[in-house]
Image (cartoon, rainbow, N blue to C red):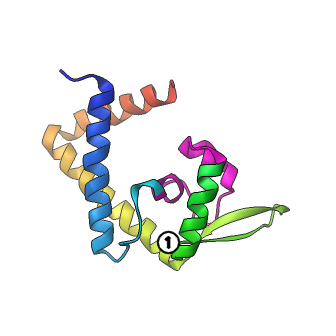
Amino acid sequence: MPDVGVLSAHLLSVFQKELFTRLAEAGHEHLRPRHGAVMAHIATGGTRASELSDRSGQHKQVIGTLIDELERLGYVTRQPDPADRRAKLVVPTDQGRDQMVQAQRIIADIEGRLASLVGKDRFTEFKQVFEEISRGY
């Protein structure tokens, strides 16, 4: 049996391929898996870049570059943080919010298919164990 690294990489690869293919079909053809470091972790009301870095595990410089790309593509804007005017929030635009809704729908569909493959209870337990292991790192 392959090790957990190989299995995780394979699952991520297959998952991302389907997610981003279907997002492209839904009108978000310029997004790439790397943009998930921002789009998968951003709140609809906005999130500071430092929080996106913490949530995604990516360096702040990488997140800054991704935010720049997503801003050029029209998915996010930078706005003053009402809690601290010196800070900026990364806020999804209408296009960004549409992508978030589409991604949630597609992910639910993918996870539903996976659950039907192994059974809902086993899939729920798999996600719980996978999350527990991920938090341990």
Quadrant in which residue 25 is drawn: bottom left
Quadrant in which residue 43 is drawn: bottom right
User: Is 10 drawn above or below residue 45 in the view shown?
Assistant: above
Q: Give whichever of 25, 111 is nearer the camera.
A: 25
In the picture, measured across the screen, residue 70 lies left or right of residue 114, that is: right
Identify which residue is drawn at 54% across, 68% down. 70
Q: Give whichever of 126, 55 is nearer the camera.
A: 55
In the picture, measured across the screen, residue 84 lies left or right of residue 34, that is: right
The percent position of residue 137, horizontal first and vertical second, equals 51, 25
Q: Mark 1 points at which residue?
A: 97
User: Is 69 drawn above or below residue 6 in the view shown?
Assistant: below
On whether residue 81 falls in the magenta region, the answer is no
Crowd band around label 1 with a 10 angstrom C-alpha radius: few (<14), some (14–19), many (20+): some
In the picture, measured across the screen, residue 52 lies left or right of residue 108, that is: right
Give the quadrant of the N terminus: top left
The percent position of residue 83, horizontal first and vertical second, equals 81, 61
The percent position of residue 65, horizontal first and vertical second, equals 60, 58
Identify which residue is drawn at 46% across, 30% down. 134
Disc 1 residue type?
Arg
On whether residue 46 falls in the magenta region, the answer is yes
Total marks placed = 1
Q: Give the range drawn in magenta.
A: 35-60
The percent position of residue 89, horizontal first and vertical second, equals 70, 63
User: Is 19 drawn above or below residue 15 in the view shown?
Assistant: below
